[in-house]
Every structure is written in structure tokens, then in C-alpha cells.
Amino acid sequence: MNHIPLGKFDDFFKPLSSRPSKGCYFCRINGCNEEVIGFIKQYDTKARQRGVVIEGRLPNPDIKNLSYYSEIMGEDFRLDKLFISSALRKWLPRVDFNRNQQISSAIYNMLSDLQRKGKNENMLKNAYIKFMCWLYYKFERMLSYLGSDEPPKILYDGDVSSYELMMLRILSTAGTDIVMVQCHGDAAYLQQDPRSEYSEELRISGMQPFPADFSLQKLRQEKAQEAAVQRIYGPEPSIKACTNAWVQGRGFDDLKTPITSRGNDSKFFYNCFFRMNGVHDKVSYTSDLYRYQLDVKNSGRKIVIVDEVIPQPTFEEINKIRKGNYARVEQLIPDMASNISFPQNIELQKLMSKVFTDLMLEISKEPGNNMSRLTNRAVYLLCWLKRYSPVLFEGWKMPEVACYIYLGGCRNENEALFIRMLARLPVDVLILIPDKNKKGAVEDSLLLDFNYDDSLQLSKYPQDSAELRVGTVAYHAERELDKIMYDDDSGIYRTQQYGRADPIVLRTMYEEIDILWKEELKYRPNFGVSNGVVTIPVIFSKICGVKDNNVENYWISVKRLFTSDSLVFDHFPIIPQGMSNPVRSVATEFFKNGRLQRDVIKQHRLYNYGVLREEAQQHILDKLQILINERFIKGTFENGTEYTIVSTILSLDTTVVRLIQKFDFTKVNPKVICLSLNENSMSLEDTIFLTFLSLVGFDVAIFVPTGYQTVERWFNSGKERFDVHQIGDYVYDLRVPNFSRVSDKFPTKKSWRDKFFKKGK
């Protein structure tokens, strides 16, 4: 049968009677695109039904194959058409006369061609036996289709050898369509057929080299997945979304377009999916938001407004979602989708199911999404859909469109996925990020971004006129000036500009303490501000001995550290161990599973810090958590010391609490000065108290002229937060002086001239 040129892919699947001329196709494919991949998938299916698929190489006949052939056919061979035809009748008895003639003629012509090229009789016999074995073991089941109006198909995937190409030519001549997929290009083939006489190379526009991981097996897996996906989808909804196609790019003005003016095709609902980064006008922005939601409500449209976070699903919501254990996505999606029920409108229910299925299939292809994680994400989607559907879609009918406004952008992938789901339902989805320095988590081809130059701090959508707060032009100008002047890197800071701080202990020489003690924190080494968190270098030192054995100067050096915000303790213990503390009885309620129960603490009648600035309260609780987590104190998480820590820190003296309340992290920090003049040691509570104050940001100086270990007892080894300075000899039995009579200046040393002239008088 003749080999005819291919016009288009569809010609391969036409019967012989409908082809331009009677003949078969023999093509090579050396590259791919979407159209080629689609054809290979379709041809692979046909070849499995009415032909043979060869992946790799045709295996050479093995010893068993050759032994069986010899047993049935003997060793005779003649290059004679009648001999070959007779041998085929015996070897392939189910092949009828006409097909026998086609095959034997093709084999004879091929062997004759080899003879003309100089092959001897032994070579011809070996080729003949190889062809016969291949026909019997590989191609016998397709030979019955030869000569029919629908030719058999062979799909060959690999780098063809010379004898394989001969076998394919025999079958092509006998009446078989053949496609060769050559992932490594045409080089191997052209070694056998340099002038492309036996087959044609298929070339269409847009073809690229095959991917490195291409295989027919992978294509079949994809096809099976596609079929499985089709089974996942239920009945197609009759309604569709037309998202943003009607928009003219006018931002808020587009939002105000009446639903009936957006389009008139009854199959579509016309919604929008906007994200507005920054604000169009600082002065009018909040009032514009207020009026917009008012207009939506007055028009009878349903509306939901969310501020900064979509509340997580509750246990009750999660428990209402039916779910199972899934091994495959094809099981998970339809089963989870069965949770979607909206009997008020079946078409809307179909649309919800389709959108849910589309998005779940999409994220199932993302790396790292195992069945457990996919199930959790599906639960989030379904919980939120069940929560908001009654509000957004009660009494819904085409072409109505509800409104969902999210102020603040999406925080995580679950919120982003839910927002994307809503945007494919009859809902106008509006994401507002007035602070243009913030970023939202949503990425979607449907999302339309509007970017504005100005920024505004807004954490709550103005839904009530009582909540509406607008600023004048001058007010916003002043805020802009503030932002420029009081930037993190400017070195100029407003009073109480920052609410969070991370103190670090500054390692110093003893002489530097006097220099740094009264300096503002912003001038100390290693001070910095990053992302609104201040790094404050603090002093926490134990000073041992008396410099030069000069007691007078020793007390002066202590007096020089006194400030208006200094706490001075002239003995240990400061807090006697086991001292009555009402918080101790409830400490186990305040600290559970390694975490402070902040809500419980703040609502308890024994919590006395509720009058403080919110930032000050958070600072206290943050550092209390760190004090426990870092295990500075012996017995933490061993014998219940963590509860002593909690009760001690939540019972601070009013004076201490007020110092924390007024503490400005960029200015001079509060001070603690302790005098340990005898053998008395710090109590457990003292150690907790002073370590906590250091973590809060206080400077702490402990003077121990005796050099005794009165400080170290309750610290875990290696966790001592303080620095130690040995400044002179140890001195004992000192008494605390009346500091009101102690100078804060060292005596002036007299020069030799002063001494000489005074002596002469």
C-alpha cells in the first residue's frame, strides 16, 4: 500500500475510503506543543485498540522464541515470494489469503532490497527469521485489521534501529498507519534513512523540543487524571461569571455601576474583583467608604464587611463538615464538595460546587500539598462558605450580585483561596489596603489592581456615622511630616513612638558605666529600630570590690548613678522568699501548657495592670513569657518555679509599674541600684525581679564590695544575664551612708604647684 503525505492530524483517524488517496501514513514527530500532545494522546488510545504501542526498542527474539520457530518452521529459507507466502500460512495460520499476500510481498521486497545492497544469504535468513518472530510475538493481534477500511495503528516511542525501521516499513507497506515519537530528535532515524524516503517528518508552527521527562506512560497518567477530573465534576451550572470584563478602569466609580447596567447576557452575572492599594484621596477616603456601603445597603444588595482578618472556623463549624480519609484527590474533592448545599437555588449550588472543584484541583498540583493539608484547606473553604452564604445569597436570583469587602488584605493562603472562591460567585469582591506599604496574599488572573499614591492607616471599615473619623488636609499633612521626621532611621523619635522593644545586655568596661548610665538609649552602641521594634542596649552589672580601696570615692561613684527614675535597694533580700502573694494561688490558671493565658490574666480580678497603656501591658507579658522560656531561673519547668515567676511579676510594686508605664524606649531608661554589703543573698523572688527588669529594659547595677556570691545562687549555670566587674580589693563591714550628704563629684586632685605654694604659706 502506498505511503501518502499527511494533511492534518485528523486525517490519521479517517477511514481509507475518506482519505485523499488510498494509502497509509508514516510520520515522525520530533517536537511538541499542546496540539501535538493532544494528538499523541488520541493516537495512543487508537493504537491500543487497533494496533501496537512500542515504548523503547523491539526486543530481539530470544532463545525460546528462536527454538520455537525452528521447531515449527525448520531451517529452510529461500528468497522467493511463494516460499515466504507458504511459510506465513504455516507460521500465522489465522491470517487470511489477502493479508498473507500483502505481508509476504512486503517482506520479499524488503529482503530483495537488502540483497541489492550486498547482504549475503545468511544475513537475509537472519533478517527473515527476525521479521517472522516479531510478526508472531509482537504484531500478530493487529494483522487481522490489515486491508480493512480502518487501518491498524502503530505508535513507536524511541530511537529506531535499522532492523526495526525495516519491520515498520514492511507493516506500513502492508497497510498500517505509523507514528514515530522521537524525543531525542531525528538523528538516529536519519542514520537509517538520510533522505527521509520511508516516512515524513511532521512540522507545525510552535513546536518545541520534548520535555526531559516526557513519556507515553506519563501522558496516559495525565489522560487518566483528566478522565477522573471529568468524573469529579457534577452537572454543569447554567450560569457563568463575567468578572471585570465590563469594567472601565475607574475604581470606585466602577463599583457604583448598577448591576443591570453592567451587561445584558442572561447567561452571565456581572461581578468585579478589585484590590485597591493605597488611597485615592486622604481627606475623602473614609467618607467615600462609608457612603459606598450605605449605597449598597440602600439598593437592597447583600453585603459583608471584614476588618483585617476573616475569623477562623469555630469547632462547631468544623464539626459540621463531613470528611473522611482520602488516598487520592479524585476521592477527596467530590466527597468534600458534597458538603455544599444551597437548596434555595440549585443552579447556584452547582456553581459553588464547580468553583470549589476548580480551586481544589488547582491547589492539589502545588508542591507540598498532601492529602491531610488539602483536606484542611477544603474544610476552611467550606466552613467560610457555609458561614457567609446565608448572608450573601439569601433569596438570590439572577442577575443579582452581593458585595464582600475585606479591609486590610488577606493574611494567608486560606483566606486568599476563599476570596478567590467568592470572586467566582455572584459577589463583588473588594480588597482594600489603604496602607500601600502592606501586601495582600491574593494572586489571581482575574484580580484587577488599582494603585494609588497616598497611604492611610485604617484598621476598621466605617459602617456607622458614629465611627466615622475624617481628617483635614492640614491633619494629613502633619501626619506626612511626622512620617518623614520620625522614620526608623531618622534618629529623631516622637514620645512613646514605639510599643515593642528587645533589650540586649551591653558588655562594657566598668569606667563606661558612669558614662553610659544617664545617656539616652538611642545614643548607646547597638541601638536600632527595625520594623517598629526597638533594640535597646541595657546595663546589667555586678561590681565587686572597692577601687583603690577608697571608700569615700566608692560611695561617690554609687551616688553618681542616682537619677529621678532610680530604684535603690540597700540590702538583700528585696522580696523575702515565700512572702505573701495573692497571685500565687491562681498562677496555675495563668500559665498552662508552656504559655501565658493572656486573656485569662487580663480578665482576672487580681490583674492590676489593666490601667496601663496597652503597649506597656503587652511588653510586660512578652518579657514574662521570655523569662520563663529562656529558663534563666533554677527550677523553671522542673519544680514549679515558673508559677513563682508568674506570681512575682504580676505582683510588682506600684512604683515599678509606673516606671514601666512611662518608659520611652528611645530615651533614658529606668534604673535599679542594689547594695549588697554583707553575707545576705538575693532571694529567688529577687532574682526573678531583677532579671525581669533587665528584660523590660531597666539598667541594673549591683554593688558587692565584699565580692561574695550573693547574686548567683538562683541563676541556672550559664544563664547569668549580668556582667561582672572586679574593680579593686574586697572591703567588708561597710555601712550604707546617708546619701543626701554624699557628694556626686569626686574630689579634685591638687597639682604639685598647689601643694608647693600652700606649704609655703
Image (cartoon, helix red, strand yellow):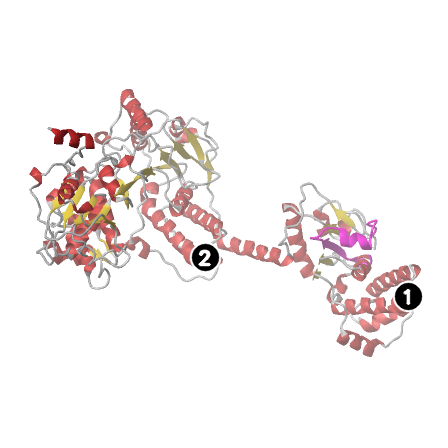
Can residue 3 be seen? yes
Which region of the structure is painted magenta? 173-197
Residue 162 position, x and y percent, is 81, 59
Q: Residue at x 71, y 53 (%)?
A: 182
Eyeballing the image, is 120 above or below 683?
Answer: below
For numbered disc 1, what is the local secondary structure?
helix
Q: Position of residue 727 (x, y in %)?
A: 22, 47
Q: Residue farthest to the top?
A: 474
Give the amino acid type for the residue marked by disc 1 in the picture. Answer: Lys
Mark number, residue 370: 2
Q: Nearer the viewer, residue 332 or 603?
A: 603
The amino acid type, in three-letter code, at marker 2 is Asn
Residue 144 vs 385, above or below: the answer is below
Q: Is residue 185 magenta?
A: yes
In percent of width and height, residue 389 lies at 34, 45
Left or right, residue 498 beside residue 683: right
The question of residue 533 being in magenta is answered with: no
Q: Nearer the viewer, residue 676 or 690?
A: 676
Front residue of 731 and 92: 731
Q: Is residue 423 above or below residue 62?
A: above
Q: Residue furthest bottom?
A: 71
- Judge left or right: residue 89 versus residue 422: right
What is the quadrant of the C terminus in the image?
A: top left
Helix, strand or loop under label 2 = loop
